[in-house]
Amino acid sequence: MSDSDSTGGGAGAGADGGTTAGAGASPGVLPQQAREIADGYAVDGAALELGALLWGGVCLPGAQIRIPLAMLNRHGLVAGATGTGKTKTLQLIAEELSANGVPVFLADIKGDVSGIAAPGAPGGKVAERAAQVGQEWEGRGFPCAFYALGGIGPGIPLRATVTSFGPVLLSKVLRLNQTQEQSLGLIFHYADTKGLDLVDLKDLRAVVAFLVSDTGRTELKGIGGLSTATAGVILRSLTAFEQQGAADFFGEPEFDTAEFLRQAPDGRGLVSVLELAAVQDKPQLFSTFLMWLLADLFHDLPEVGDLDRPKLVFFFDEAHLLFNGASKPFLESITQTVRLIRSKGVGIFFVTQTPRDVPGDVLAQLGNRVQHALRAFTPDDAKALRATAKTFPNSPYDLEELLTGLGIGEAVVTVLSEQGAPTPVAATRLRAPQSLMGPFPAAELDAAVKGSSVYGRYAQAVDRESAYEKLTAEHEAEQRTTADEAAAGTAAKGGRSGKRPKAAEDDASLVEQVVGSGMFRSLARSVGTQLGREISRSLFGTARRRR
């Protein structure tokens, strides 16, 4: 059976590491300290039901642990070692949110979250867990939409244009250094101001090639220029990136992240499941793409302040991949996005193995914590355990002992109360998800994808005229003019009648192809204010050209 439906261990070590006061108390009687903890989770408004308090090795169904729905935009963290039940906790929280009318975004990296669309199967362990925590369990499926990056794998294709993805996130994916990232920013700035749409990667290559050509190198001279060496690094990185299959993720039709904010006809929140199993070997790409989705939401959504329930809760799985190797400015942008997106009605849950994977400035923004068991097999593990225990509020538990003794489907919880204050630390036995704890049947997944109301909007890729096509067309026009002049015996070229110049025949690279092009000079003269207007970019340099 899956993680959450296991009975789990007998967590409940008390203060000073000894037996908790009230150990052995019957589930119907709450010891004084347990009652004080339970009182901290009393809620007047709508709330998510997580499970029941564990005290002295006993599960107390009369002491329910909840998260106030209005506090979900204060963000959260779900952490724990492999196999402790994190995935089922995500599934449980997503179900509760959907049932309360809140849309959810989930990244399904291993392919086992998709079962949220189908009813769970009743069984002995599920019934046992439900009885332990006081849960009225009934198998239920929840409304889902399935997506896939670039259409790789089952799901509605998610694509972004290079223009909207922006230089900051693209630099992170290409692993550029700070100087190269700044140069890429200049390239985007130039394309923005000249009205050149960077739809896919070949558009970006064409503009880079032009800007280091004899004709184009003066275009950026006044704002720092672009060195041939830096351009070479960018072009090589783009080529390697494409060889990994990344070209599929960039293009049109570009996905509108407002699709994530929908509700089902019955009023339940839509669960958007991004299937990543087919690209789990490209962690840098999918973690950065998740950040683009979040940044795009931040860019588009209006300020709404505090709501009685969030507009969307976004689960950022494998969060450590986003922060690994990130530059200081990149981390600052993440921190600012997390801090500010709260007022736009969006809650974010980072999911990882240990809180140490999340930078301190980001961790400080996460008001809701669900910490599954940690392991302490090595000195480094023991150090991480002590550091994690210190991040929780004071409690009657010996947290270091408790965190290593939790069973599967059990966690240490602290959230924000309806007044915005941290609740007491509570060892919790979590409820069992009501949906299928495993992959959605493959035979039904394709039909579910194609039956979506938005499938036709994004299924077919479109390759319209953009920077590459404009440059190529102008170059070919110039080549024809040159050939005509040569055929007429133009003295300056000295060409042979009826033959194209040898240089045109020997063009082998994109850089050589655009050298000498007058495309940008003509664009500068002819482009109107609507196309020539610079794009306004967000904290991450993301943008969407408004037409």
Image: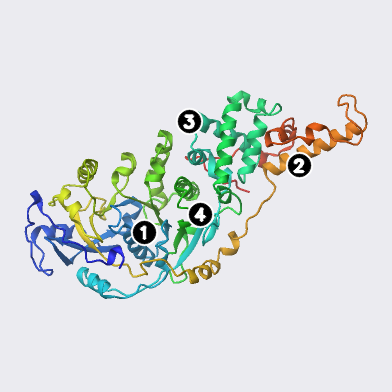
Residue type at mark 4? Answer: Thr
Whichever of callouts 1 and 4 sits on the residue coming sooner in the sequence is 4
Instruction: Judge the density around disc 4: few (<14), some (14-19), many (≥20) Cα neighbours within 10 Å.
Output: some
Q: Quadrant of residue 100?
A: bottom left
Indicate the amino acid at tag 2: Ala
Residue 2 in sight here: yes
Mark 2 highlights which residue?
A: 473
| Number of residues whose C-alpha sits closer than 10 Å to that of mark 1, classed few (under 14), some (14–19) or many (20 or more) | many
Please give the residue where the numbered disc 4 appears in the rendered image. Answer: 257
Tell me if residue 261 comes above or below residue 234 in the rendering.
Answer: below
Q: Which of marks 1 and 4 is in front?
A: 4
Residue 309's disc is 1
Q: What residue type is labelled 3?
A: Gln
Residue 408 percent across, percent down from the top left: 25, 60
Q: Is mark 2 on a helix, strand or loop?
A: helix
Numbered disc 4: secondary structure: helix
Q: Name the residue under label 3.
A: 178
Spatial CA span between label 2 and label 1:
52 Å
In the rendered structure, the answer to whether residue 374 lies left or right of residue 488 reads left
Picture coordinates of residue 73, whole percent (x, y): 35, 53
What is the x, y in percent for residue 225? 60, 25
Element on which disc 1 rests: loop
Tell me whether the residue at label 4 lies in contact with that at label 2, contact meaning CB atoms closer than 8 angstroms: no
Splitting the image into 4 quarters, where does residue 44 fall? bottom left
**x, y percentage for residue 346?**
40, 53
Q: How far apart are marks 3 and 4 (CA)?
A: 29 Å
Instruction: Measure how far apart labels 1 and 4 are at the Cα level.
Output: 19 Å
